[in-house]
Image (tube, coloured by chain):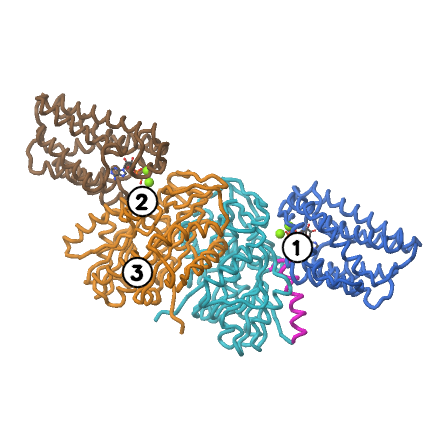
Chain colours: A brown, B blue, C cyan, D orange
Amino acid sequence: MSESFSSSEGRTIVLALIRAIQDNAAYLSDIDGAIGDGDHGINMNKGFTLAEKNLSGGPVALADALDGLGDTLLTDIGGSMGPLYGMFFQEMGGACRGEETITPQVFQAMLTAGLEAIQSLGDAKVGDKTLIDTLVPAREAFAASVGAGDDFATALQKMADAAERGKESTRDLVAKIGRASRLGERSRGHLDPGATSCWILLRALAEASRGLLGA
Amino acid sequence: MSESFSSSEGRTIVLALIRAIQDNAAYLSDIDGAIGDGDHGINMNKGFTLAEKNLSGGPVALADALDGLGDTLLTDIGGSMGPLYGMFFQEMGGACRGEETITPQVFQAMLTAGLEAIQSLGDAKVGDKTLIDTLVPAREAFAASVGAGDDFATALQKMADAAERGKESTRDLVAKIGRASRLGERSRGHLDPGATSCWILLRALAEASRGLLGA
Amino acid sequence: MQRLINDPNLVVEDMLKGFVKAHPDLVTVTDNPRVLKYVGAPVPNKVGVVTGGGSGHKPAFIGYLGRNMVDAVAVGEVFSSPSAKAFYDAFKAADGGKGVACLYGNYAGDNMNVKMAIRMAAKDGIEVKTVVANDDVPSAPKTEREKRRGVAGEVLMWKVGGAKASSGASLDEVIAAAQKAIDNTRSIGVGLTPCTIPAVGHPNFTIEPGKMELGIGHHGEPGIQVTDLKSADEVAAMMVDTILPDLPFGKGDEVVALLSGLGATPVMELYIVYNKVEELLAAQGISVYKPYVGNFFTSLEMMGVTLTVMKLDAELKSLIDLDAESMGITQFKRA
Amino acid sequence: MQRLINDPNLVVEDMLKGFVKAHPDLVTVTDNPRVLKYVGAPVPNKVGVVTGGGSGHKPAFIGYLGRNMVDAVAVGEVFSSPSAKAFYDAFKAADGGKGVACLYGNYAGDNMNVKMAIRMAAKDGIEVKTVVANDDVPSAPKTEREKRRGVAGEVLMWKVGGAKASSGASLDEVIAAAQKAIDNTRSIGVGLTPCTIPAVGHPNFTIEPGKMELGIGHHGEPGIQVTDLKSADEVAAMMVDTILPDLPFGKGDEVVALLSGLGATPVMELYIVYNKVEELLAAQGISVYKPYVGNFFTSLEMMGVTLTVMKLDAELKSLIDLDAESMGITQFKRA
Ligand SMILES: Nc1ncnc2c1ncn2[C@@H]1O[C@H](COP(=O)(O)OP(=O)(O)O)[C@@H](O)[C@H]1O
Ligand SMILES: Nc1ncnc2c1ncn2[C@@H]1O[C@H](COP(=O)(O)OP(=O)(O)O)[C@@H](O)[C@H]1O
Ligand SMILES: [Mg+2]
Ligand SMILES: [Mg+2]
Ligand SMILES: [Mg+2]
Ligand SMILES: [Mg+2]
């Protein structure tokens, strides 16, 4: 089991993200139906499926693949998800540009850049019942695990587990931002769709990376 | 019991018509609610109540009183009922203008003039489920009764009875004209509102006239 | 009934007050509270153009009062003809000495009230001639065209008649132009939901969810077919297929196509339907010289659309092109 | 869902096609299918005026493309911000060399996409400045005005900004005029029924029959009060009482009053409400210099109204008075 993977595996990683959204599109719309307008899966699926078309056939640098995914989301999706996830992936791509291999340090820089992009665009904080509730603990868990001397694969697993707990935490929250905030107390008891899609993406990212590490 | 009444009793007769409509306004709207738009009583009540205001205080010639009622309906009601009932009463008034007393012959001429006015304006025939189904047999019954040598009061009673049967006949008809024709077969089984208001008017006319005859 | 009204028996009165306040540059009151007129009426030496009808069809009827449009309008209760007196007073308000063209729709109540109003006006020496719009194809077979209802084609009849009158034409010329407009015009409506007269308080006909009614009238008069709700493209095709053969319209024709919402259908959807209508006309070699898409003749909060197509000749083209200023249609020639 | 659509995921595409066919004299396509522009754009040496937003608000946003109005519009999905790329392409379509005024509404998605589009345009050397409409009083307290939503006041912002740009003003002058317009403008909405995004297929909020929601947003964002359905006069008073103190408006003010339906409310009722609005303003010594009553900024088939009041000064008056030609507003000075 290795401690880094080649940055030429962009196609593998991004295709895994795309598949994860495609496979869960209906599920995401159902969740959005409970407290939003029921289109989160539709919106995400539209963007990610378009990104698949734009992905070139051969090996692609991870930086380019992520940047391309972000580009498509930014260009074609609109709404809030287009810029939020678009900038997330563009900045993640930016943070590994020029790297030959993806090490835990590079990966951590990517997560940090992605999170900061989202925070600088939207105003959401932890506890507002948004994808921030997934992303913040996931990045912290990864950093803590690496800091504690865990191997890359373990840190990825801890990131995915933290993302899942973060997503689950939104169930008990009252939405403070976005469409679901209309419901006030009635938004409690339901998962946040954005937090759920963010968990699905981070889990796919962790699994695909672990696969490349031979874990 | 006399065979004519004074033509100066216009106020008595027309007030009786007005009261009859006022007393039955809700009933007429209910009937219209079943196969029309539920406003027949509202429409009629609006017009007849306005006519009461326009009726001068002292004794009025029947010709003027009926003409005045017709005028108000024509001027202020609009729709189909305004002109149909408006012309009906104007022509009835015209047919007794200049008469000192109202005899069975004058009364018959009034009914005929009123009916012809309605027929020349609308296109309804007996069986179309309209007020024509009340008016035509009522006039025929009056003429037949007078022709058979009955006294004025008896002929009036026979007119009212025929009007009631005519009104009842509309229950089994399918509407061919007006709003209720939309329902086709579903209009069967319900009274026609216009036929019902026409019966109420003719009954009131018969009763008030019989009162003046001392019957 | 989710409606913004006060006394349901006074909706027309309240609406008229607001309308006059909102359009002081276009319309003004008359002595008859049920008659509004164009601020410029009566225009001396111009044939007066009058219409009238029940309320609840906004912009029709008062929304077409204006410059080069209608001079006076008789206003009825919701879905109910104005009184004869209102038509008569509208004639007087519009008459500038050259007579009055009364351009209205074919409904029993309107026919009766106009007929009597003409008799009243005759006593004053006002000459009134009429054109009775009967553009609604589904309401009677072609052999009984005189029985057909007038629907959104009335808007084009007013546009043409109003423009002709402004050109200084005689009463007979105005009547001839408006008659030609309506003779060259065919319409059809599709209803998706019923509507509720405020004073009545509940819908007086039904269209089940998931269904639609082809050929429905502006007051919910029965159509020719109740079917499952179709796609916008299919609805466009059903409408086009019903009205084109009736005139008939054919290859090389230039037309006005007027697509009006019935009130509650989002305007977005009118454009979706129009997209297909234009395509279907083009496929038959019919070109749209002038499109009108919007809410031009409505039925309270009914959902649905009406399609109106008018075949043009040189005269109709120039009359349709003339500037017009009214709440319902405002158009100016390009500077 | 009684709607006239084809594929619910393609309503925007279908609508845009129909819109371009219906208004060939006003608008035209660009290379980006989600950007339409005024046929005259880019006007050389004129500041370009751009807006954009989600679909389903017709006439907003594309309905304000036109002469002396908006030059290019970025079009989003129903109730969803256009992409950054669409805003960027709209900037390019509108830029006539004097920069671009992007006048849009305060929504999270729009803010983010505009921000990124400006970065893209900067790389091309196109200068873009923004005014972010926040006229909706109920959406945040006055102390947090920057959080308020933009609603129908945007229409007046476009009218003023478009007119200013046509006068040959610089980008800073256009921005200043549009900013003044929105700073002088306050709005409030009342919802009577929910609405359904076609791709979703069911309403995503509810207003019970017999109830109404004061302060509702254009996408059903929560209002400040759910009450029993009130009379038109009471609704007018609730709206007037909420917005007048906020600016505040007062005795002697001359204003534009814009009363817009939310889509499915019969236009008749808008006049009923306007009648009372005008009366209440007059009672406070506020005179309506220019009324706009109609469907100017809608929310699909929602029932309800929004009231917008803008305080005028000499500059705003002359900009409001300028001729305009667009689907949503067409007005010309009296000949
Ligand atoms: N400002 C924000 N920052 C982070 N996430 C946000 C923000 N606003 C909304 N979201 C996320 O967006 C999700 C909904 O996305 P989606 O359904 O695609 O958009 P919409 O609400 O416009 O239909 C929410 O569940 C929430 O997680
Ligand atoms: N052409 C006609 N001739 C005679 N009666 C008619 C005609 N058209 C309609 N009616 C009568 O009108 C009645 C309905 O009147 P009303 O409810 O006041 O008008 P509306 O149908 O416009 O609401 C019907 O019951 C019918 O008797
Ligand atoms: Mg959603
Ligand atoms: Mg959405
Ligand atoms: Mg009735
Ligand atoms: Mg009625």
| Tag 3: amino acid | Tyr
Which comes sooner in the sequence, label 2 or label 3? 3
Q: In which quadrant of the rendered image does the C terminus of chain C lie?
A: bottom left
Residue C137: image quadrant is bottom right
Q: Which residues are magenta?
A: C106-124
Relative depth, front residue between D189 and D130: D189
Judge whether A87 appears above or below C56 on screen.
Answer: above
Visible residue check, residue C248: no
| Image position, residue C111 (x, y; %) | 64, 62
Number of the front mark, 1 or 3: 1
Ligand 3: image quarter: top left
Mark 2 nearby-residue class (10 Å; few <14, some 14–19, many ≥20): many
Marks 2 and 3 sit apart, C-alpha to C-alpha, by 22 Å
> Disc 1 vs disc 2: Cβ atoms closer than 8 Å?
no
SS for callout 3: strand
SS for callout 2: loop
Relative depth, front residue between C69 and D244: D244
Q: Which residue is mark 3?
A: D38
Q: Which residue is mark 2?
A: D80
Marks 1 and 2 sit apart, C-alpha to C-alpha, by 51 Å
Q: Is mark 2 within 8 Å of ligand 4?
A: yes
| Direction from residue D94 to residue B87 in the image, left or right | right
| Tag 2: amino acid | Ser
Q: Which chain's residue wears label 2?
A: D
| Direction from residue B37 to residue A90 in the image, left or right | left
Q: Residue at x 17, y 31 (%)?
A: A13
| Tag 1: amino acid | Lys
Query: What's the magenta bit mostly, secondary-structure-wise?
Result: helix
Mark 3 nearby-residue class (10 Å; few <14, some 14–19, many ≥20): many
| Image position, residue C247 (x, y; %) | 53, 60
Magenta span includes C233: no
Q: Which residue is mark 1?
A: B46
